[in-house]
Image (cartoon, rainbow, N blue to C red):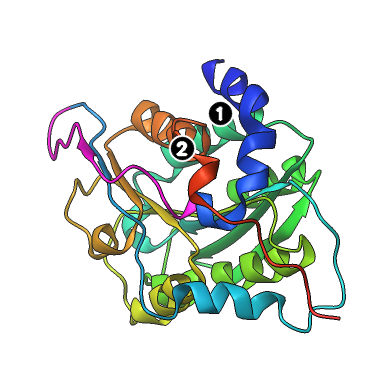
Amino acid sequence: MNALRKWLPRVALVGLMGLALAACDDNSTNGNNTSGGTTGQTTAAAPSGPSEQGGRDQLLENNSGGEISLARNFYFVLDGSGSMGGKMDEAKAAIKIFVDTVPEENVNLGLFVFDNNGTREVVPLSAHNRAQFMAAVNQASPGGGTPLGTSIKTGVDALTTQYKKQLGYGEYRLIVVTDGEASDSISTGVKPANRYGIPIYTIGFGIGERHELRQHSVSYRSASNQAELAKALEEAVSELDVFDPANFDAPKQPAN
């Protein structure tokens, strides 16, 4: 697949750029489409605030553990709420296509699901866990509300913990697949994501461009069927971005 080819030539470059790069996508808007059979895509500058850079720096202060790693980290939040009842099979099939494309080496995956079985992290962020990841996706059973705020907060916590383990190197993305508005406060997750510069990539499945997360995501894509969702997932993690390393400083080393 085209996605696999995109992973290999540039992974080292992206890794060295670290978290700051992932939070600085192209700030243009391309192909917005709220109806029909085309995947809409809105890409905006990463959410930022006065404490964002300071927040990232604080993660490495007095950090005595960890070692440099260029691993890429993708934490998924999968909406399994009741409204996903007619879409879950398509979502599972699209995610399977994604998982089959992701290389085993130098990639960590994590998964948080809210569905009929509750709200919980089902796959901790780690490497070599493709089978576990896909098994957890397949077990999702639609039902319940849409606690996006709590779910995103858990993903941010997992990614910032990994950031410290990798001493600020590597890449970090939070990917949200949802078909509805949050049933809790979205700011619960968005605020810490902004503080630490964790980029949120949202795919609105069957809801077009109008979603609360659109204004808080570095990239928002809409999908109305399995094929469009699979394509949106591929684009969310592929190397479509062009980064200039001269614009970024290397992560700070931990204090002794």
Q: Which residue is mark 2?
A: 233
Which quarter of the rendering shows the C terminus? bottom right
Q: Which contiguous range is marked in magenta?
A: 22-36
Q: Quadrant of residue 223?
A: top left
Q: Earlier in the sequence, mark 1 or mark 2?
A: 1
Q: Relative to 252, say whether 36 is above or below.
A: above
Most foreground residue, 93 or 31: 31
| Residue for point 79% across, 79% down | 255
Kindly give the residue lying farthest to the front in the view shown.
246
Whether the residues at callouts 1 and 2 have beta carbons within 8 Å, the answer is yes
Q: Is residue 155 left or right of residue 233?
A: right
Where does residue 224 sit, x and y in percent of width and height? 27, 36
Where does residue 71 sit, x and y in percent of width and height? 73, 46
Q: Which residue is mark 1?
A: 97
Please name the amino acid that badge 2 sits on. Answer: Leu
Q: Quadrant of residue 128?
A: top right
Where does residue 67 sit, x and y in percent of width and height? 86, 60
Q: Quadrant of residue 126?
A: bottom right
